[in-house]
Amino acid sequence: MGSQTAGSVAPQHITDELRRWIVAQAEAGCRPQDVVAAMRASGWAEATAVQALEQTLRQRLHEIGQPLPAPTPTPPLSPARLTPGPVPEPLLSAGPRLRLSDGHEVHLLASLGLPRVLVFGGLLTDAECEGLIALARPRLVRSETVVNTTGGSEVNAARTSEGMFFERGEQPLIRSFEARIAELLRWPLDHGEGLQILRYRPGAEYRPHNDYFDPAHPGTARILQRGGQRVATLVTYLNTPEGGGATTFPDAGFEVAPVRGNAVFFSYDRPQASTRTLHAGAPVTAGEKWVATKWLRQGVFA
């Protein structure tokens, strides 16, 4: 999503690329005010962002034959939603090569400040990747997403993968991997959700979305009873697909190639689009993509 810089006086043009991006956010379930906030964080003037959103969504609704919704006021953000909180601070003081207590060495390959993104090389060995795939394969089902209005989950067209969850510490391989994550990210092991394994077949994707739970949605209060808000995500690639499947950060113009054993970590200190952690799993164009995802919470996830 390109823009002029925030202080520029040059006109900002609503491009086809921007319109496609807005449609993708809407189809993934993002709220209009969060889309506008993401555009403002990328340097768009608020008036231009609102105009682009309204024009694009009206045009899209007309194309698919849906009636235009009545305008509704956008509630102001509460101070609590704007206050940053603690997030995992990965072990980086040793430099780009990080030797963990289990003897495993992890390499820091890339680092961004906003969004806060780190790319690690060699978080898992080839044998560990194969082991996780073998444990997960018999238990795969169609992936679901959280239903914001209830706090439950359901199959969503925006997410076309298959997946399963391990209980925390369910298998020796899971226990050793979770201990490695806890040490690397310097976040308590019991503050993590169970490890999720996903398989993306050719054409499968996960459209742009945020991993935090929006406090404005009715179902969020129920979700937060187990461990509080999500504060970070670690996605580890269990294989290298033949084509496609990158993890993309549209607001930052950054993408991470899916390479076996490598991982991408990103944190969000508040449930706001200002963290610029909107991300997506690009479509797999050839072969399969397998990933292991660990979500980290504010408190103990039980």
Image (cartoon, rainbow, N blue to C red):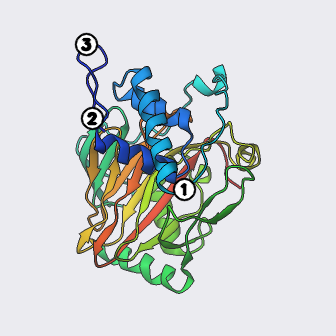
Earlier sequence position, callout 2 versus callout 3: 2
Q: Which residue is nearer to you in this view: 298 or 270? A: 270
| Residue 297 horizontal/vertical position (percent) | 60, 46
Answer left or right for 45 relative to 98.
right
Q: Residues within 10 Å of mark 3 (few under 14, many from 20)?
A: few
Asked whether residue 267 appears in the rendered view, the answer is: yes
Q: Residue flagged by tag 1: what amino acid is it?
A: Gly
Which image quarter holds the C terminus? bottom right
Residue that label 3 marks? 9
Q: Which mark is residue 2?
A: 2
For the N terminus, give its image quadrant: top left
Q: Residues within 10 Å of mark 2 (few under 14, many from 20)?
A: some
Mark 3: which secondary structure? loop
Q: Where's residue 292, x and y in %?
A: 44, 65
**Residue at image coords 26%, 65%:** 259
* Depth check, front residue: 167 or 233: 233
Q: Secondary structure at mark 1?
A: loop
Residue shown at 67% from the left, 31% from the top: 72
Labels 2 & 3 near each other (Cβ < 8 A): no
Question: Nearer the observer, disc 3 or disc 1?
Answer: 1
Number of labels in the image equals 3
Check disc 2 and give the amino acid type. Answer: Gly
Q: Which residue is mark 1?
A: 65
